[in-house]
Structures are given as structure tokens and as C-alpha cells.
Image (cartoon, helix red, strand yellow):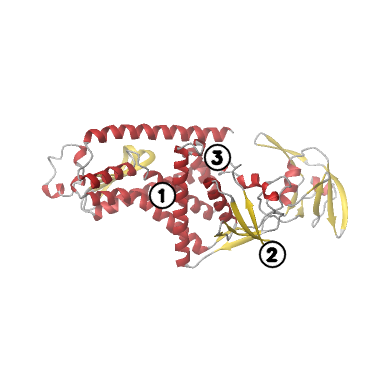
Amino acid sequence: MLLQTILAFAVVLGVLIIVHELGHYLVARWCNVKVLRFSVGMGKVVWSRRFGTDQTEWAVSMLPLGGYVKMLDARDGDLADVSPQDMQREFTRQSVWKRIAIVAAGPIANFLLAILLFAGLYSHGIPEPAAKLGAPSEQSIAWKAGLRGGERVTAVNGEPVQAWGDLRWLMVQAVVDRQPARLDVVDAAGAQETAIIPVDSVPTEKLDGDFLADLGIDLARPPAVLGQIVPDGPGMLAGLQQGDEIVAVDGTPIRDGMAFVDAVRAAAGKTLQVRLQRHGETLTLPVTPETLEQGGQTFGRIKVEVAMMPEMVTAGSGPLAALGKAVKKTWDTSAMTVKMVGKMIVGEVSWKNVTGPITIADYAGQTARIGWISYLSFIAFVSISLGVMNLLPIPVLDGGHLLYYAVEVLTGRPVSERFGEIAQRAGVGILMTLMLVAVFNDINRLVS
């Protein structure tokens, strides 16, 4: 599992770095700027080869967290030995608009990658749980809003919902915007209703967890109907049979298969009074789960198969519609990321939302184990985040250089070298601080 996580993270990192730097490289070549080196990784070069008429060095460097494209640049040192023809291709001699294009090309390449991945996934069709709600508890916000379970959500705040992923994403936006979520639903009888869900109680640091459950919004799952019974397991010894529908445990109603599994897992070595329906007859059987030790924790197990798979839908689109949805998804995700950054700066959102390489590696491994659709979706989201973060106006990042060029466009002269040096040091300090916060949050997540 650890090896798979490392490999999945390495692929994500490698793809995103190469795509980002290829953006810079291709536009630099298009602008006739001489490229000296294309490096995946930072620091000391450990492998390199030269190709092309310019003999550009393609390299792999020691530190894997990043990469760079080194162009012929007068700021890097003495260029006395450079030919007059090559000096015309030196970076700082290009017009400010060419320099803007070259610098912006990296983040734009990340956005384009996300669009292509999303478009491919939407064209293929993404199997997802249907946006059908389970029964909420009577104390929940969803219950107080009038939801009773079995409703199918068709829209959130006017945005259409095809599957559970759409519902969750739109609820995330509502939480970030601190606006109530208006759910348009169709109940089991086909009647259309509207439920207003206040989201003020949801802290933003819980958005990467099951925050919907805190609101009482849960995925509808099938009743707890038993499938295969393992011979001589606790379930068979207690008299459970295939086809039994579990309706209550120790007097507590069981709404679905997941609830029954949770009740069993929490009762290792304890006898449960299980009420069930069998061929129209109601029975109550004593069932004692056996004890299972796993990962330092104790669980109960009765060795029976329980139906838990929710209703699934495949959200697919034609090529043009898929491309449109992909562009919208990329734009919405980018806007959400910018909002989160802004709210963190003004103190409306906790800095606990900043994640680093450890969390990204963990999610890479998890999505890779789920399947290629989840993994490609994860790469697309990280690519968007990388694009947005690189556009932040922080010296050292692409956004910092774009800020310099914007000043040059407005004033007609470049930013002074002295100011650039000071800003560069400040940018390094900001990035180091952000990295420390991200690593601290990553470690805190692992510990907690």
C-alpha cells in the first residue's frame, strides 16, 4: 500500500511538473527565446541529455518537488561569449507582452490539462451514486428543513445536479460562500419540493471530510438485506439466512445496510438482539459478533454479506457538451480556490485548510486504489490548484513575475533590480512559511 501511494504521488507530481514547464518551454520557443535547460526537479542535475538545434539540455534534478525552464537571460550572468544572433533571443530583450505570455503559459497549461481530463471523463461517463438522500435523524438540520429520506436532489441553488458528486460540490460552494443551500428535490411520490439548508454550522476545515453527514444529508442506501452467509460464522450459528432483512438491533431501527454494519462493528463480543423480516414473518435472534483486531482497533464481525451499494447513475455527455462542462468545472474550481485563499487571508477561513505534499500523496494513493476515474479526477483538481497557486502575486512564483510585468506595462519601465531582489527574498520567506504551515497541517491530520 505504501509503495502504491509513493508511485501514485510520483506520477501526479511528474505529470503536473512536466505539463507546467512544457507550457513555459513551448511558448518560449514560439516567441523565439533560446531555452538552455528543461529540468524536472530542482537542485543538482543527476541526469541530462541535449537535443535540438539549440542543444537544449533536458534534465532530471535531485529535488523532485518542482521543475524549471532556464532561458538565455542577461540577469543570470556574463553573456560576453554569446553570439549576436543568440543575444536577439535573450529573454529580457523581448517585448513585455512576450514575457507575459511565456510566464503565464505554465499555469495556463495546468488549466488546459484539467479541462482535457474532465472533458475525457465526462465523454466516457462517470459512474457515481445517484443524488438520492437517506433518512436523516430527527435532530438534524436536514430533518428540520423538511427532508425525510428517499428524495432525489435535482438542483442546488439553481445549479442542476446529476449525481452525488454534483450535490457535494455545490454544497461545498455554499459552505465557502456562507449562503444557505436551496435544494430542489423530488420525493418518492414524484412531488417537487424545496428544502433550505443553513450551512453556517459547518467549519471550512471539515470540507475534505463527511461534512454533509453533520447536516443530516446522507447517501440513500438499500435496506439491510443479507446476501451470502459464511459457513460456521457467527451469523450462520445465530440462525441468520440469505434474504433476511434486518429492521432493528437492540430496539434501534436499522435504516440501511451501512447502519447494520456499523452496529455490528461496534459490538465485538456483545450479544445483539437482531429483529428481521423473513418471508413476511418477524423474528428476533441473538447474534454475537466475533472480535477482530485490525490496525490497533477492535471490531465486531458476523461473516455475512450485506447489501450496501447505492443506486448508481452514469453521468455522460457528448464531446462538445463534455468540453463545456469541463471548462465550467475548471473555472468553478479555480474560483473556489481563489475564494478560499482570500478568506484565509482575511481570517474568515482557517489556515488548517492549507495542505502539503503528505496529504496530496495520501489522496493520490487513495484515489489510485479506488480506480482510474477517481485518480484522473484527482490529477485534474491538483492541476487546477497548482495553476491557481502559481498565479498568486508572490515574488518567485509566476504570479509575482506577472505583477512585475503589469507594473512595467503601466509605467513604461521595468521594476528596478534592487526592488526585485528584496521582493524575491520576501517571496521565498512567504513560500517557506506556507510550506511549514502545510507540513504541520499534514502531520496534524495524520496524528488526529
Which residue, given by chain and number where applicable, does mark 2 sit on?
191
- Residue under the point 67% across and 50% down: 142
Q: Nearer the viewer, residue 114 or 393?
A: 393
Q: Can see residue 379?
A: no
**Label 2: few (<14), some or many (≥20) within 10 Å?**
few
Q: Tag 3, which secondary structure? A: helix
Amino acid type, callout 2: Ala
**Rendering coords of residue 114 (x, y %):** 43, 54
Left or right, 16 with respect to 138, comes to left
C-alpha gap between disc 2 and disc 3:
36 Å
Which residue, given by chain and number where applicable, does mark 3 sit on?
205
- Residue under the point 26% across and 45% down: 405
Q: Tag 2, which secondary structure? A: loop
Height in image: 40 above or below 440? below
C-alpha gap between disc 3 and disc 1:
28 Å
Which residue, given by chain and number where applicable, does mark 1 sit on?
15
Amino acid type, callout 3: Glu
